[in-house]
Amino acid sequence: MLLMNLDDTTSAANSSLNTSVLEHSSESRQLNRKVSVQMPTYDRRRSTGSKEFKFINDSAADEGNKRKSITIRKTTSGQRLLTFCNDESDATSQTAEPNKRSIFKVDIHKDPPKELKIDYLSKAIFKAGYNIRDAKLEDILHNDISDEFLQGLYIASAYTINNYFGVPGPKSDGPQKLSTFLNQLIPLNSTLKNESLQKSKNIPPPPFTITIHVIEAMDLMAADPDGLSDPFCKIWLNDKKQLYKSTEVKEHTLNPMWNETFRFNLHDLKRDIIYIEIWDSDPIGFRKNLQQIKNITSIRGCWYFCSDLTEALCHCGGQSVDDFTGKTEIEVGNLYAEGIDEWLSLKTSKGNPQRGQLHVAVRIEATKPKNTTDALKRHLLLVKLCLEHGLKGNESTDLSIFCWDQILSSSARTLLFQHSVQGNISPFEDSACRFIVIIRLALQRFTFDFQFLYNIVEEINKNMKVLPSSNENYLNNPLGDIYVQALNSLKTICHGILSSLHTFDITKDETKRVEFQFVLKCLSLYEDITGSHAGIWGVLRTEAETWSANKAKDLKNIKAKDRNKSIMKFLDFLKSYQMIADEVVRSVFPEKNYTEEIYETCQRHLWEPLKSHVSEMAKESRSGEETRKKEEVLEIFRKLKEVSNYFNSVLHRPRQLQIGQLHEWFGSHTIHDWFVWKKQVVSAQIELLVNRDELETKLVEFAGRHEKQTASVKQTSDLIQKEFYPIWELVSDSNCPECVAFFVLGLHSCCMKYAESLIELIHLRKLSNNFHSGGRKKLCAMANNLWSLAWFVKEILEESGITLQQEFPDTKFSLQMVCKILCSDISEEFKRDIVDHIQNVAESKTKKEQGIFLKEYATFMNKLIKREAATDMAFEIYLLFLSNIWKYVITAVSYFKSKPEVVTCLTRVRKCLRRASNRCDGLLSILKETEQLCYFDEEGKLKNIMLSGEYKTLIKELEQMKLYR
């Protein structure tokens, strides 16, 4: 039984009680000897940083397999008694539920921080005559630093360097460099310097503690029959293993997550060692060990079962014998001053590499003084002095300061860090001191990047959130008051930027855009911290009011010769500026947008002068024939519509937007003039395209189909699509029904111009006269073109969403009618030949002669229909052509059927013999042959044309005549 001082043992006892794990007695033996110093073997791939540190490899520790219970009881005098004794009961180890909070907020088993009753440094400085204790934080911040304070600060800084802890990190400097920096920072004469150094050496060093955050482990060695383990950690300092602290037991896992924090008082920063062992908790009692037989999953698991059962038998089931699974050690003297967060490889009890890794975070801290006000004042003085010293090199430059490296050297950062830790200055207080000084300097003459300022305030805000609950009123203490004043100053600086926002070209300058974003972020953070409104939208509206009023004056004073160019430039700027500003605002305030806040202001000042200029320019464009003016006014309409559409997409108030009433601004006469102008331009170009067309048919994809056509129809459709249709797309609006009529009439005029120009080529190129020497092919190409253009008109009207009214011309129907007339003319050229062939068949005297004429007819029709027409004509034109040919055949057959026969000797003989003439057979053969040639399409489109009532009657009559004998 061991009696210990309460202050030294309370933390260890509380930690052990909180784990709810019963510790057992009589550690068999303990050998903690230093053998060698070597680098740690941790997994770089899982490491959160790139730090390296050393630890002790204890190869002589041969720990026993017995655990002890830690029991705390009070004596009759109220004193706490810490007892390590053997646990003879058959009790079951209890474990707490795993803690799922963030590892940065976990405080399980964390000992309450002790307070230092005497702040040795503050007492020594006060005793030396440097009375910083009575100085106010406001005076320290705003007044010049006196020689008295400088010398006291020199002593405090020298004391900090004398008690330098840890080893320098990648961005830190050691004591020697810090001493050199201190002499540059506070230059004293040799006498004062020596006196101050001596005074600093006479001050007792601050007591340090070390905090170990045991986060997790992975890939541990199995120690139970089921192939898993019930791991927990033992942690102790130096050779005081009997005072170890332990984590909770995590059952049935090889990858436990603990997230538990422990603190130890350090005795020697250079020689102290932290030992960590991982053990497997075994059940207590013979029966419970025997029950593990059902969990055996492998031969190794069987060995673990036999081992645990044997140990239980040896101890008569009265206590458990836990299994050692790995260990690691951390040498405090080789830790980085900033601490470590690493994965450490485990070792066996003899120091050999062992399976598994342990993730820990370790940092060194100073014991908190009873009163930290003096330390805070010294820290504010030191921060102010370091920042002013670092900014001396930036006085002659206009560049913005965007990172600490520009103003704080590695020595300055290291000195401030060491001073904050040794003075127990919290991260919130340290970052607040820096921010307060930075804002003071920003109000004087230095320029700081707003992203840099935001990052500082964000860091402070995060540090505030992890302050102990006892510090909830952190803004109501003297430092908090100054911090709030600095936040208000930052708000004023941000308001200054917002009040001149339009002077920054955020549309083209990415730097200014980012600055605007972080100004808003700073103000948003201000609202979160203070709970007060930052007045963002009021400032933006006021700035927009001023800018809009000034811009309206500029618009009114635009000269006529510069009007078009100036207004187009202004509209481009307005749209791009609103889009960029909205994008930036939404990145900070997702529910807000800049346009909605300032639109009313813009509408009040800008739309009237814009409307006045637009109306005047529209009037000028109507009165003249100059193309340039029409194009400029049309471009202004396009830009205004883009601005209107963007505002509407943001505000969702189309009827209330003055800028959306563009048809009123420009007038229907101007819009009609644009359609007429474009119609004339397109028609003139169509005539040139047609005149240049050689009418050579090609298979071209057109209007979603593959068509036989020439170049001019595709060029015409493209011309309409690119030159005429965009006018409709631009001006179409439900508020302007006249636009539909303008578009339909213009489209009809352009298409009929194409048809007229095409028909004129028949006479110009004498295609009818040269019908059989190339004219027929070109006429077929014309018919194909007209039919394709008709389908194009159908497609473009559907795309426009236009339903033709009765008063509108049907362009598609008109083009198809022209096409039918042209197709009829082509068919007419073959009518005489068809009739002659039928006449030869009908009037043949003998069967043999009739057979020869039928063969000639079939050859002629096959060439006409299948070789020539099918090759040169589009399918729809081909159907029209066949329909005409079929009608000619029916008409000719009907004529010759009814024509009286010439009375000859042969006819008299046949009549006497009651035999039909050859005419019936020949005409029936003509019909059958023609039907076979024409009726071949799979879709049956010719069925209704060919198998008409007239055709059926004719067949029936011919059959009856043939049967008459």
Image (tube, rainbow, N blue to C red):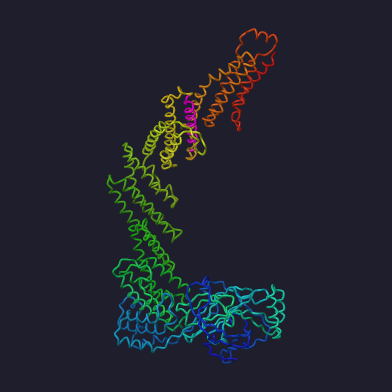
Work out whether residue 288 can be spotted.
no
Q: Which residues are magenta?
A: 773-795
Residue 131 drawn in magenta: no
Question: In which quadrant will I find the C terminus?
Answer: top right
Instruction: Say whether residue 603 is left or right of residue 704.
Output: left
Could you say which is closer to the camera, residue 444 or residue 852?
852
Question: In which quadrant will I find the N terminus?
Answer: bottom right
Q: Is residue 771 above or below residue 427?
A: above
Displayed quadrant of residue 531: bottom left
Residue 791 drawn in magenta: yes
Dominant secondary structure of the residues highlighted in magenta in the image: helix
Q: Is residue 815 above or below residue 549?
A: above
Displayed quadrant of residue 431: bottom left
Q: Residue 881: x and y, percent? A: 54, 26
Residue drawn at point x = 34 percent, y = 63 percent: 496
Q: Residue 830: x and y, percent? A: 52, 22
Instruction: Say whether residue 182 is left or right of residue 931.
Output: left
